[in-house]
Amino acid sequence: MHTAIIMDGNGRWASRRLLNREAGHRAGAQAVDRIVRAAAAAGISTLTLYAFSSDNWHRPAREVQALLGLLRRHLLLQSDRCLAESIRVSVIGRRERLDAALIGAIDDCERTTSAGERMHLRIAIDYSSRRSLIEAGALTGPRAEPGEFLAALARIDHSPPSPEVDLLIRTGGEKRLSDFLLWECAYAELVFVDCLWPDFDNTEFTRALEEFGRRERRFGRVSPDVSGGLAGRGRLGADRPVAVGR
Ligand code: FPP
């Protein structure tokens, strides 16, 4: 079960409280701690969080610095906790535009937690799905087998190969993918919630998982009621059909 989350709404959460946007991101980081624990407890095997897109560089410099500083502190603080809870952390996205202190925190956290088996937590920083796809395509060439292409994509993203996304949640009320995991979400169930990210709690998360459980996943096939076959409900732990179209 791979869940991915677009954590939107920190800015609006802050402005409703007459706070600056940075305060919204700090509250968002607390929600991250909460949901990482809830996801591990729910048996999710991979959780990918969209923390900083490549387009976020176009935000005001002060907000960019605050966000990247927050990410560095988060990685430093969470490293031991993730180790204790057997959570493996990887950061996906470009590294070369990040400052040395953040790259150091990423390397430390990835190294410290590399043996974690309970859940794989992937944090997307300076991430653009379109760029990763273009680079993986350039690396493998037009005749690549899907497996080869996926291995290249993982290498570009600095992540061990990960399963495709089963459930994509976006908070904050907008309904778009914003250049996040475009390949990996090919058959993901999309759940959009109005709740702003800092308010996203265990109840909201459980509700999203329940909504996923009600979806019928057909992977381009017909309903199992008709075929007696392979498609299935999106419940946690459901047997998944092998990926088709490959
Ligand atoms: C989008 O909300 C959110 C972001 C661009 C940053 C997400 C970052 C965090 C949740 C905090 C740090 C993350 C980790 C992993 C510790 P927005 O600012 O666009 O909100 P708005 O749409 O209300 O303006």
Image: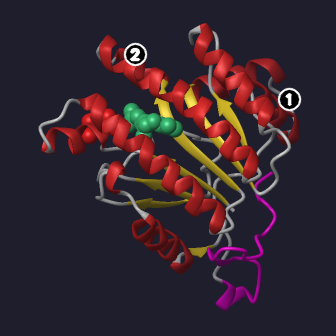
Query: Residue tagged by mark 2?
Result: 65
Q: Residue at x 61, y 29 (%)?
A: 76
Task: Work out whether 191 lies above or below 142.
Answer: below
Q: Secondary structure at mark 2?
A: helix
Query: Residue tagged by mark 1?
Result: 143
Rendered image quadrant of residue 19? top left
Residue 112, percent from left and from top: 78, 34
Which image quadrant shows ligand 1? Answer: top left
Q: Residue at x 86, y 31 (%)?
A: 144
Residue 156, percent from left and from top: 74, 24
Residue 125 painted magenta: no
Q: Which residues are magenta?
A: 224-246
Mark 2, other Cα within 10 Å: few <14 / some 14–19 / many ≥20: some
Residue 102 appears anywhere in the view: yes
Residue 41, percent from left and from top: 64, 67
Task: Work out whether 121 lies above or below 236.
Answer: above
Q: What amino acid is found at the position of numbered circle 1 in the picture?
A: Arg
Residue 127 appears anywhere in the view: no
Q: What amino acid is found at the position of numbered circle 2 in the picture?
A: Gln
Q: Residue at x 44, y 73 (%)?
A: 207
Task: Work out whether 192 lies above or below 154.
Answer: below
Residue 105, percent from left and from top: 65, 22
Task: Work out whether 211 lies above or below 29.
Answer: below
Q: Of 69 and 136, which appears nearest the observer?
A: 69
Residue 243 painted magenta: yes
Tell me the quarter of the image containing the N terminus: bottom right
